[in-house]
Image: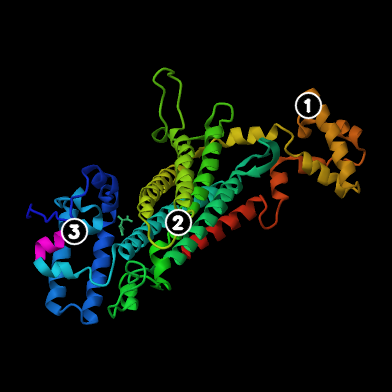
Amino acid sequence: MSKEQDTSKLWGGRFSEATDAFVQRFTASVSFDRRMATEDIAGSLAHAQMLHTVGILDAAELADIEKGLAQIQQEIDDDSFAWSIELEDVHMNIESRLTALIGATGKKLHTGRSRNDQVATDIRLYLRKSIDIIAAELTRLQRGVIELAQDNNETIMPGFTHLQTAQPVVFGHHLLAWNEMLERDYGRLMDCRARMNQSPLGAAALAGTTYPIDREQTAAALGFDKPTENSLDSVSDRDFAIEFCAFAAQLMTHLSRISEELILWTSAQFNFIVLPDRFCTGSSIMPQKKNPDVPELVRGKVARVNGHLVALLTLMKSQPLAYNKDNQEDKEPLFDTIDTVFDSLRAFADMIPAIQPNTAVMREAALRGFSTATDLADYLVGRGLAFRDAHEVVGKAVAHGVESGKDLAEMTLETLQAFCPQIEADVFDVLTLSGSVAARNHLGGTAPQQVSAAAGRAAARLDAR
Ligand code: ARG
């Protein structure tokens, strides 16, 4: 490959002195926007083909541009492309190399476009590709959650409110609650994708162009649903980046809540689950330690994703139309958000199916803490008491249980009858854990058959994606 690239500025005509060396470094974006090189080349190909269709480039010129861009893609892929900071950004690096490779025809590529619509196109293409990768990883995670739920539709654990034992639930029901959170995140991601998939190419600098361009053609060639409506908005809009980061902040918030539960559950005090060693690390000083580093780190990564969302909102706040150089600051937060979300999803998608529930410990925990107290109250309502009166009776029985160290199911019938004479021997059916969960037998409830059906519906939704 030719080492001598033309480093003279592509906009040099008006200028009488070279850019200050520090300003050059300060304003350059190539160190991070070169990540969009493949999208930049795709955009240039679509643009060049359109220029040929409308008669601005002849067939030979188009062929040269296509050949040159293909070689540049090759150089980038095998890491031999000589990126230059003097050429500021990915767009000018590639255009400059094209001219070095094919000569004067390279200089015609930029006819009827600007870096302003070019960069807007590149980011949308890059983000769309990233959304599709993230959507697949999110689906993989959901698949693992749903399968674990199906396997645990009868595994009883305490359900909590205020982190205090509330009522028994099955582990699968808890897992499907996670899946609902993730399902909404998927919906938000798809909304973002649907709204962003429009082509800004042709907006040029801000006002459109005097050439007879065909924006429908470039939009279709790049897989966009249609061209954007307004040239000013096209080059200034970064809503799609904000929207993606809002999706990401919400998803990461969900992952942090799941992380928190995993961290609690792996503690010696809960001991509800085991995370395989490959997802944990030890301590350099305390030999007994096995730390749930993966969920902890995911919980911590919410910080940077939330930060990126605020950064982008602040970046766009009060910006006058149309393009401003400020917008170059959109890429690093967006790229880091994409990377962080993908890595977090990957870690979770690998880890969740490997969770081993300690079913005996979960069950034992549900037996403690009077988790069937509501069931006893409901039983008394069945015997004719008003719910408030039943609540009072059961409260007294629980107070006795706290004092005597006995769960409701462990008390004798006589003891229970002392609190309420309407209680009969069949009370022990509702005081059992399995009776308690089985009784919540309606859509969205924790009865094993409902959980199994819900897992089936959740899996079918994934299949339909
Ligand atoms: N590197 C610039 C960016 O990231 C590309 C667009 C520059 N446009 C301009 N008129 N300076 O936004």
Relative horizontal placement of residue 211, taking residue 263 as reference (left or right): left
Relative horizontal placement of residue 284, taking residue 89 as reference (left or right): right
Vertical relation: 434 (above or below) 97: above
User: Residue 322, how many percent across, how many down?
Assistant: 40, 63
Relative horizontal placement of residue 316, taking residue 152 as reference (left or right): left
The reply to whether residue 225 is in sight is: yes
Q: Is ligand 1 closer than 8 angstroms to the Cβ of mark 1?
A: no
Q: Residue 192 versus residue 441: which sits nearer the camera?
A: 192
Vertical relation: 127 (above or below) 25: below
Residue sitting at 77 percent across and 43 percent down?
430
Residue extent of the magenta highlight = 96-102
Tell me which corner region of the image, top left, top right, bottom left or bottom right, holds residue 270: top right
The residue under label 3 is 12
Name the kind of residue labelled 3 in the image.
Gly
Precedes in sequence: disc 1 or disc 3: 3
Mark 2: give few (<14), some (14-19) or many (20+) Cα within 10 Å. Answer: few
User: Residue 44, how many percent across, how many down?
Assistant: 24, 67
> Is the magenta region chiefly helix, strand or loop?
helix
Residue contact between numbered discs 1 and 3, judged by CB atoms under 8 Å: no
Precedes in sequence: disc 1 or disc 2: 2
The reply to whether residue 353 is in sight is: no
C-alpha distance separating marks 3 and 2: 27 Å
At mark 1, the secondary structure is: helix
Name the kind of residue labelled 2 in the image.
Gln
Residue contact between numbered discs 3 and 2, judged by CB atoms under 8 Å: no
The residue under label 1 is 402
The residue under label 2 is 319
